[in-house]
Image: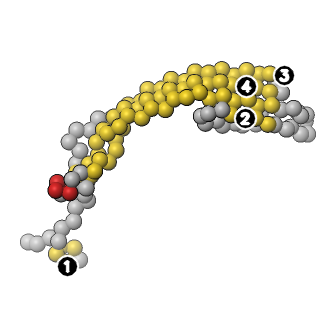
């Protein structure tokens, strides 16, 4: 019996070699910070330190063509993300009909929402 696909002879594999041993990804994370209200809540400041490390990151690793496969998923990397985030927001005009706001952020990522 000859393997066929739509009447055309041949055999096609996915190119992925099954993983021999694959461990789960593991992450550890630390985040600490504080928020400070200023000028009767017309301004605020925050400072946050974060440190995250992920080990045994699962990535596709290229294989030699002589193996008959293109790639194999392995525990191939360690990722680290750390930094300091600083934010300063000012609301110089604040009443029932209008509220103005300006702010700035330091390195890292920041999200803001209106109150």
Q: Nearer the viewer, residue 35 or 97?
A: 35
The Cα atoms of the two marked residues, 1 and 3, are separated by 79 Å
**Which residue is outermost to the bottom?**
7
Please name the residue shown 22% across and 38% down the image: 21
Q: Is residue 8 above or below residue 102?
A: below
Sequence order check, earlier mark of 3 and 4: 3
Please name the residue shown 30% across and 38% down the image: 75
Q: Which residue is mark 1?
A: 7
The Cα atoms of the two marked residues, 2 and 1, are separated by 65 Å
Q: Nearer the viewer, mark 1 or mark 3?
A: 3
**Residue 86 percent across, percent down from the top left:** 66, 28
**Residue 46 percent across, percent down from the top left:** 68, 25
Sequence order check, earlier mark of 3 and 2: 3
Query: Do residues under tags 1 and 3 come within 8 Å of each other at their CB atoms?
Result: no
Q: Which residue is mark 2?
A: 104
Query: Crowding near pointer 3: few (<14 within 10 Å), some, many (20+)?
Result: few
Please name the residue shown 47% across and 29% down the image: 52
Under tag 4, what secondary structure?
A: strand
The Cα atoms of the two marked residues, 3 and 2, are separated by 17 Å
> On residue 45, which mark appears?
4
Query: Do residues under tags 3 and 4 come within 8 Å of each other at their CB atoms?
Result: no
Q: Quadrant of residue 47?
A: top right
Q: Is residue 36 left or right of residue 91?
A: left
Sequence order check, earlier mark of 1 and 3: 1
Q: Which residue is mark 3?
A: 39
Location of the N terminus (image quadrant): bottom left
Can residue 53 be seen?
Answer: yes
Query: Crowding near pointer 4: few (<14 within 10 Å), some, many (20+)?
Result: some
Q: Nearer the viewer, mark 3 or mark 2?
A: 2
């Amino acid at each position: 019996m000859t393997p066929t696909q739509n009447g055309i002879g041949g055999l096609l594999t996915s190119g992925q070699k099954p993983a021999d041993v694959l461990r789960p990804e593991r992450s550890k994370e630390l985040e600490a910070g504080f928020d400070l209200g200023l000028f009767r809540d017309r301004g605020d400041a925050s400072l946050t330190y974060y440190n995250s490390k992920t080990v045994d990151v699962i990535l596709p690793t290229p294989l030699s063509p002589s193996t008959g496969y293109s790639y194999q998923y392995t525990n191939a990397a360690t990722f680290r993300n750390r930094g300091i985030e600083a934010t300063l927001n000012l609301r110089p005009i604040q009443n029932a009909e209008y509220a103005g706001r300006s702010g700035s952020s330091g390195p890292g990522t920041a999200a803001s929402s209106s109150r």
